[in-house]
Amino acid sequence: MKNYLKSALIILLMAVFTEMDAQIKSGYVFGINLSTMSIKTGGVSYDAETPVGIHLGRLFEIPLITNFALEPGFLFSSKGVDYIIDSLDVSISPIYIEIPVNASYSFGSKAVNASLLAGTYFACGIGGYKIVSGGELKNIKYGSGENHDLKLFDIGLNLGARLDMFGIMISVQYGMGLVNISPVKTFDTEMKNRVIGITISAGRESFRSKSDR
């Protein structure tokens, strides 16, 4: 996991600081998360509701070959889930720093084009809250063991599509967590993030290439 984080950070820093002949583009993004979790305890799955969260940050586009690009980014992302287990009504809303690294394939005209997206993400919990059975709001404790609420790190896969119309970009992406973020090992408890993200961006600006200087 540490190696994954190191690789993701290197890719992101290359996008921000490395001088390249290719035109690197970047843009700020904002959107909503329709998030939930797959929850199992003792082999039994529990129904979970889908609260609304937000995400915001910056994405980069590094051209690779014709129509293909690498798109790393840096996001603040609020996720969460509402569920009932053993008559307890639980609401948990974690906040993550998330580093997505997607590959994109684009097609269409310069004015209107579409893109298919696929890749991975790494996320680290930095905050959030939980409420149990209408009680007081408490901060989420990240770690392992009975005294914690969620594990600190999450890794998952992304799959989505984007439409670019005259510089306005709208994308829909599904994020599927691969890591069991439940901090407890009893009863074979399993919790995995599931998120549909809807993102809007007002276009991306190009860095100046070496040939322009």
Image (cartoon, helix red, strand yellow):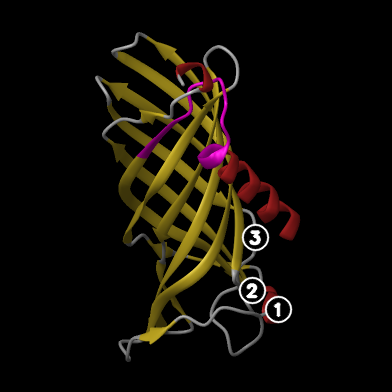
Which kind of residue does numbered mark 1 sit on? Lys
Q: Nearer the viewer, residue 121 or 40?
A: 121
Decide: few, some or many residues near mark 3? Use Cα within 10 Å; few <14, some 14-19, many ≥20.
Answer: some
Percent of width and height locating residue 24: 48, 28
Q: Are marks 2 and 1 in contact (CB under 8 Å)?
A: yes
Q: Residue at x 70, y 78 (%)?
A: 185
Outermost residue, front side: 213
Q: Residue at x 39, y 10 (%)?
A: 108
Which kind of residue does numbered mark 2 sit on? Thr
The stretch of residues the image draws in magenta is: 15-27
Of the two numbered discs 3 and 1 on the same chain, state the one appearing first in sequence: 3
**Structural distance between the alpha carbons of marks 3 and 1:** 13 Å
Residue 33 appears anywhere in the view: yes
Q: What kind of element bears circle 1?
A: loop
Tell me if residue 138 comes above or below residue 203 in the rendering. Answer: below
- What residue does disc 1 label? 185
Percent of width and height locating residue 179: 65, 60
Q: What kind of element bears circle 3?
A: loop
**Structural distance between the alpha carbons of marks 2 and 1:** 6 Å
Percent of width and height locating residue 28: 34, 42
Q: Are marks 3 and 2 in contact (CB under 8 Å)?
A: no
Residue 158 appears anywhere in the view: no
Was residue 18 drawn as part of the magenta stretch in this picture?
yes
- What residue does disc 3 label? 179
Q: Are marks 3 and 1 in contact (CB under 8 Å)?
A: no
Number of dots carrying numbers: 3
For the N terminus, the image quarter is bottom right
Residue 189, numbered label? 2
